[in-house]
Amino acid sequence: MDAGEFDINCLRGVRDAFIQKQYVRQKINERARIVQHVFRWGVSYKIVPASVYHELKTLIPIKKGEYDLPESKERQTISLADIEKTLVELSPVIRAMVKIHLAVAGRPTEICEMRIENIDRQSEDLWAVKLDHHKTDHLENVETKILYLAKSEIDTLLPFVGERTEGYIFRPIDAIRYEKERRATGAVFTKKQPSRAARDAERAKSPKQKVGECYNFSAYRNAVYRACDRAGVPRWFPYQLRHTGVTLIGLEHGVEAAQHTAGHRDIKTTLRYFHGENEIAKRVALSRNKPATVKATTEDIKPVPIAAKSKSKETVIAELLRQNQQLLEMLVQKDESTDLTDTKC
C-alpha cells in the first residue's frame, strides 16, 4: 500500500486490532498518536499529501469506559518501611543511589549519570551537581538542572568519589568490587594451581561480560527488583522514588518547593507526582483535636479570588494546597512528626 492511500479507516483498523488484544486504553491512544506523528513528518518532507495527515487527525481517542478496555495503573509512592527493608539487601553503590534519589526527587537517569567533574563544592554542608543531560534540556529557555545535596547526601557520596577528579560517581565496577570483598570475608582460600592461575589471568584480559562506565535505568531497576525479592517486599521501581520524594518534599515544604526541586516548569506537572492530598486532609482533621496555639481568624485566610474560577482545575488545587499548608503552620505543632508509610496515590 502506498503511504498516500493510508486513510482513517486503515488507522481505525490498526486500532481495532489493539482493542481485540485488550491493550491498555492509554497505550492504544498513544500508538494512534505515533502513527499520526509519522504522517505529519511525511507531510513536512512532502512524502505524503497534507490531506492524509489532516484526515488521520480526525480519529477521536478512546474515552474511559469504552470497549471495556483496562486502564493503566498510576505510579504510586513507596512505603518508607519497604524502602528501608530493600536498602539492607542492596549493594553499597545502589544503596547510595536510592538514598540520594529519594532525597533529590530526581529522575533515575539523572542519578545514574551524575559526574564528579560537575560537582560544585559550595561548602561542607552543600554541594551542587550540574547535569549534562536531562529530559527537558532540548526545550527553549530551560536552565541547566542542578541537584543540591545536603550534608547527609554528601557523606553518602564521599566513599564513591574518593580521590577521583572525573568520571561517573556510581560505577558498576565498584559494585563488583564490593561484592568480591563481601564474598571474600570469612572465605577459606587454597593455593591455586599454576594452570588455574593462568586461566584466571587470561579471563581478566578479555572478560565475557563487559562492564559499563555507569549504570543505566535497566540495570538500576533490576538491582532494585532483586533486592525487593530478597527482602520479601512488593517490587517497586526507581521512578517511584521520584513520586515519593516529591510527595515528602511537598508535605514538608509545600508544593512549590517540590516543583523547583523536581525541576518542573509547570506546577501542573508537579501535582501529578504529588500524592499527599489525603495526608494533608488527615493532618487538618487531627489538628482539630488539639487546642490551637494560634487562633486563626477569617482575616488570616486568604480566599481564592473570583478570577480563579476561570483558572484550570490543577491551578486551583495548587492554590488550595498552599492555603492548607498555611493553616497547618498555624494549627499544627512544629514538632509533630511526619509519617508517609501508608500514603497512597
Image (cartoon, helix red, strand yellow):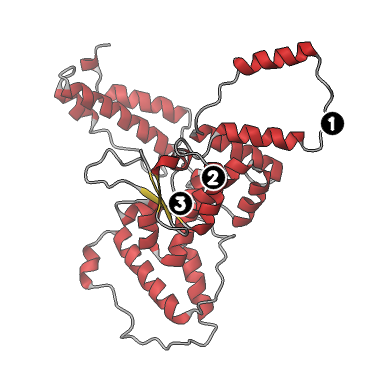
Could you tell me which residue is drawn at 63 percent across and 45 percent down? 234
Mark closest to the chain's N terminus, 2 or 1: 2
Could you say which is closer to the camera, residue 130 or residue 295? 130
Report how far apart the C-alphas of labels 3 and 2 lie in the structure: 11 Å
Name the amino acid, label 3: Ala
Report how far apart the C-alphas of labels 1 and 3 lie in the structure: 43 Å
Q: Position of residue 185 (x, y in %)?
A: 77, 38
Name the amino acid, label 2: Met
Mark closest to the chain's N terminus, 1 or 3: 3
Could you tell me which residue is drawn at 21 percent across and 27 percent down? 40
Q: Which residue is mark 2?
A: 97
Quadrant of residue 223 within the rendered picture: top right
Question: Helix, strand, or loop for circle 3?
Answer: loop
In the drawing, does residue 133 fall left or right of residue 246? Answer: left
Q: Which residue is mark 3?
A: 105
* Residue 207 visible here: no
- Outermost residue, front direction? 163
Q: Position of residue 302 (x, y in %)?
A: 30, 78
Could you tell me which residue is drawn at 40 percent across and 38 percent down? 26
Question: Helix, strand, or loop for circle 1?
Answer: loop
Residue 189 drawn above or below residue 165:
above
Question: Helix, strand, or loop for circle 2?
Answer: helix
In the drawing, does residue 214 fall left or right of residue 299? Answer: right
Quadrant of residue 140 within the rendered picture: top left
Numbered circle sitting on residue 188: 1
Residue 158 drawn above or below residue 32:
below
Quadrant where the N terminus is found in the figure: top left
Name the amino acid, label 1: Val
In the drawing, does residue 82 fall left or right of residue 111? Answer: right
